[in-house]
Image (spheres, coloured by chain):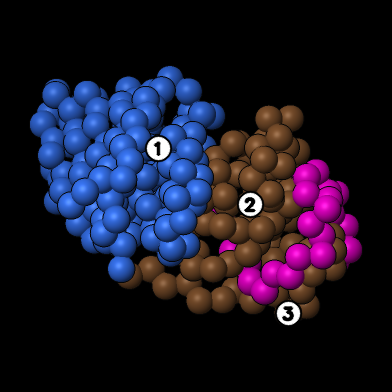
Chain colours: A blue, B brown
Amino acid sequence: MSDIIQLHYDVDGTDFAAAGEASMKIKKELRSLGFPQDVIRRIAIAVYEGEINMVIHADGGTADVNVGLDEIEIILADTGPGIPDVEKAMQKGWSTASEEVRNSGFGAGMGLPNMKKNTDEMVIDTEVGVGTTIRMKVYVA
Amino acid sequence: MKIQEIVALIDAEVKSGSDKLEEEVSSAFGSDMMSEVLAYVQNQGVLLTGLVNEQIIRTAAMMNMYCIIMVRGKQPTDNMVEMAEDNDLVLLTTERTLYETSGILYTNGLNPAGHSYV
Ligand SMILES: Nc1ncnc2c1ncn2[C@@H]1O[C@H](COP(=O)(O)OP(=O)(O)OP(=O)(O)O)[C@@H](O)[C@H]1O
Ligand SMILES: [Mg+2]
């Protein structure tokens, strides 16, 4: 697979209002590259949920996108607390979000299952006390 | 339904996108939880919410929606208005509650549309 372009963004973990800026830039970039609307929408949703997670559950992180002709790979990496039980975290409705996060419109326990639903591949690599890396791929049909 | 008709039906104030009131929308979704919007919405054009922060604009933009209605007299910040303009979104405010606003728009033909969370 040959990459057309590689994108890299830093996600600030201290600024909730700015969470989603990287996803927005990725969406605009993919649009200007002419990818199908459905592909862009699925990626936008998955990256946005992942970016929000890095801000509300970790201390921010990085978002890397490898844009290929046949597939788009997204790697979200943080050095936050890690996820102790991934199977539980993947269940719809399971959340450790604080009251404050819930009052900000997140913390329904929907993000990870929604990321899985919108991507063709998703692998979570996480270790408690070390961090979490999520690799997702969306095929360009 | 044209966004202009929505404005009239719920006595809304237009905060951004006044040049886009002729756009047609056919369905809507209402929630204060943005991760629910991200999980359930399929192709709804309108988001009704009582939540006030930047993420309502980003969520609507990610979902390619056309219009956000802030209910219960909630007011956007200057930054939210600017973000809405940047993303070609119509941002409306109404004094009416979420329930009332939904009822009026539903009765006048704005659909809940297909929302399937698998
Ligand atoms: N990057 C991360 N670092 C540490 N924990 C995480 C991370 N992402 C998710 N989690 C854990 O997994 C749980 C489930 O995540 P998920 O995104 O599905 O739901 P949520 O973020 O709690 O709520 P929502 O996504 O609906 O806003 C979180 O509550 C949190 O405990
Ligand atoms: Mg989440």
Q: Mark 2 lies on which chain?
A: B
Question: How many marks can you see?
Answer: 3
| Residue B98 located left or right of residue A76 | right
Q: Which of B63 and B39 is in front in this view?
A: B63
Q: Name the residue under label 2.
A: B49
**Cβ atoms at labels 2 and 1 below 8 Å apart:** no
Where residue A14 appears, as percent x and y from the top left, is 43, 20
Mark 1, ligand 2, within 8 Å: the answer is: yes
B84 relative to B41, above or below: above
Q: Mark 1 points at which residue?
A: A52
B81 relative to A12, above or below: below
Q: Mark 3 lies on which chain?
A: B
Q: Does the magenta stretch include residue B14?
A: yes
Return the disc, 2 or 3, that comes first in the chain's sequence.
2
Q: What stretch is highlighted in magenta?
A: B8-31
Which residue occupies 74% across, 70% down?
A: B24
Q: Nearer the viewer, residue A82 or A96?
A: A82
Report whether mark 2 lies on the same chain as mark 3. yes
Amino acid on which disc 2 is placed:
Thr
The quadrant in which the C terminus of chain B is found is: bottom left
When asked about the image quadrant of residue A80, the answer is top left
Q: How far apart are marks 3 and 1 (CA)?
A: 34 Å
Mark 1 secondary-structure assignment: helix
Report whether mark 2 lies on the same chain as mark 1. no
Report whether mark 3 lies on the same chain as mark 1. no
Which residue occupies 33% across, 41% down?
A: A5
Q: Does the magenta stretch include residue B80?
A: no
**Cβ atoms at labels 3 and 1 below 8 Å apart:** no
* Crowdedness near tag 2: few (<14), some (14–19) or many (≥20) residues, C-alpha within 10 Å: many
Amino acid on which disc 1 is placed:
Ile
* Crowdedness near tag 3: few (<14), some (14–19) or many (≥20) residues, C-alpha within 10 Å: few
Q: Mark 3 points at which residue?
A: B109
